[in-house]
Amino acid sequence: MDSNILNNLQLTKVAVSKIDTFDFENVKFGAKFTDHMLTCAYKNGEWGALEIKPYAPITLDPSARVFHYGQAIFEGMKAYKQDNNDIWLFRPDENFHRFNKSAIRLAMPTIDETRFIGGLKELIKVEKEWVRKGLGNSLYIRPFMIATESGVIASPSSEFLFCILLSPAKSYYSGKIKVQIADYYSRAANGGIGAAKAAGNYSAQFYPTKLAQEAGYNQVIWTDSTHTHLEESGTMNVFFRINDTLYTAPTSDRILDGVTRKSLIALAEHLGYQVKIEPVKVEAIIQAAKEGSLKEIFGAGTAAVVNQIEGFAYKDDYYELPNIADEDAYALQLKNALTKLQNKLTDDPFNWTVKI
Amino acid sequence: MDSNILNNLQLTKVAVSKIDTFDFENVKFGAKFTDHMLTCAYKNGEWGALEIKPYAPITLDPSARVFHYGQAIFEGMKAYKQDNNDIWLFRPDENFHRFNKSAIRLAMPTIDETRFIGGLKELIKVEKEWVRKGLGNSLYIRPFMIATESGVIASPSSEFLFCILLSPAKSYYSGKIKVQIADYYSRAANGGIGAAKAAGNYSAQFYPTKLAQEAGYNQVIWTDSTHTHLEESGTMNVFFRINDTLYTAPTSDRILDGVTRKSLIALAEHLGYQVKIEPVKVEAIIQAAKEGSLKEIFGAGTAAVVNQIEGFAYKDDYYELPNIADEDAYALQLKNALTKLQNKLTDDPFNWTVKI
């Protein structure tokens, strides 16, 4: 950490906090934000001063690159408050490194750890009242970077804005979901940007997901370019349990290197589960579903932690998964173990939690 | 055209035009804009009133969908002024229809012809002094649509802004360029958004293009998912001339249905050239280069019309194209025929030009 950068941080506080009017019991994910945000501008080849200031609109020239060429990346992470009021981040170094990997793939500047993690910590200190105690409560953190240079010229911007927004979050039981395996549309190309948290990856999914929803499914399980391997579920990584072994695809240039994914793999191994990281064939999963050896499928990501799947459609057939008891579900055991660790209710043998 | 929409157009003019300070002789493509822009907001399931107002920044919530999920599309087109001061658009219906195809693929609302083409015509009437006469002068038109709803929720926005910017343009001779055939990176996935003019397609190219430039090439020729077929050159469609036959790939969900591409195909056939629209194999082009039958490669797009290529790299080898005289180059003959037609200096047997 470069203490000069943090010493020069410009802090402008709101006159009146809106926290007293915020309904922490009825929170819609990602919809509302705290009083302040962190910003930092990149210009003339370097990052400027960090600013923490009242949450406010961004004003850009209508020809700004982000509007025309989608040069934008983001991260998703969470903070948790312990009963003693300590606030903890979960593996922030993972998000920091992935943010810079995304930046490189999108021809954007990388950012230093002081501005990303140091700036985030300062922002959360200012907003500490917005982090609520109790399992299930968290503060969702959205760092992002956009290309701000004006000009409708299809080449990388030379000016950028880095920004962090904070949004109180509450875990909720969304129920098990039904998914459709992609056999026409794709999320990512070989040699494309699928492994980056690039803005354009998400809007590319909206239409195929809408079609799946119109057909009665909640999400799409994305496949590779030949539609023969299962890769991601919606905006999450995906796990398959066959008998007592968990399978998930190796990361690649099409698959996001998810922090929840890699944490669940480590936790599962720690809990003594058999985990295999290998390509997962559509036909193998269908065969396992037919034989009854396919016990569970679940998505894994920061927002929902895990998302249990009750069945999947592939072409004209629908395959229902067995109704497994909660206490026997790997998905819920792993979710429970991970959220307890994140909330400091259990030991952290991996040293994943970082105190603010 | 719905005359009510045009009658309700809200026009706010600038107090003082900046046209007298604009250097029309030294124009950088896409860098500067005219006095006014057209905007139209989509909310509650419908498009609102058209507005023509002074060119000004756009102000959005920092959680607006366009910043996080790249839900944004655009078009590129041009207007030309005849010596008698008539102003002409070139095939605006093609851009209008493609804009709506892009909108559907990105889960955005389609827009009506009155707002798109009718609104554009009204804007150009207001800005008619900015369209300069003379072959080589044009007004570049940039319609675009961005997702404006706030909330970091990875689902389609319900609010959008449609906008048209105008930028005076001048043709220039950029020289022939050297290109590199992609053998690792990709521009688009099968079943992806490559055929849409989606913002995210462009930023995905920036990094591989930068690598190609660092290796001494100007652009990348994009290939399919197996890197065996040639599909696009940079942000343009691509043509290959082998002996006296022009080849270009058929459009697909990876390849943009370019207006310049389809116009050049029609013009080439009209001029009596042999044109074949079929998949173009990398190995066939290399074989033709070795045999000396590969005469020309050129990109085709609205901004530069055609972009002649002097040679290409594939893996470790570089292939130089023969030095063909300007008067024998299909690229220049087609460019000449198309720009004369666009500028009303020749007949328009296709009825492509539309008077404002």
Image (spheres, coloured by chain):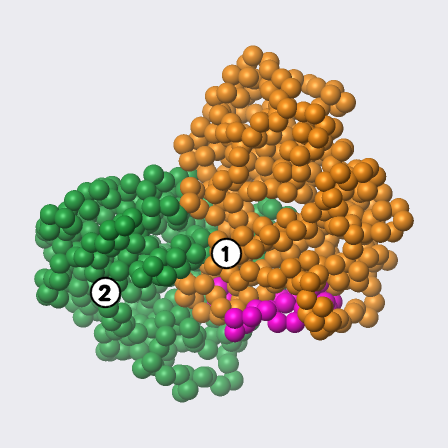
Chain colours: A green, B orange
Q: Is residue B294 left or right of residue B224?
A: right
* Residue B252 appearing in the image: yes
Residue at x 59% of width, y 33% of height: B238
The quadrant of the picture occupied by the N terminus of chain B is: bottom right
Residue annotated with mark 1: B104
Q: Is residue B61 magenta?
A: yes
Q: Nearer the viewer, residue A43 or B264?
A: B264
Locate residue A303, reporting x and y percent.
32, 64
Residue annotated with mark 2: A176
- Toward the top, the furthest residue is B291
Locate residue A204, reporting x and y percent.
44, 53
Q: Is residue A285 magenta?
A: no
Locate residue B202, reporting x and y percent.
54, 47
What's the distance in space between the residues labelled 1 and 2, CA to CA? 29 Å
Residue at x 41% of width, y 32% of height: B226
Chain identity of mark 1: B
What amino acid is at disc 2?
Lys
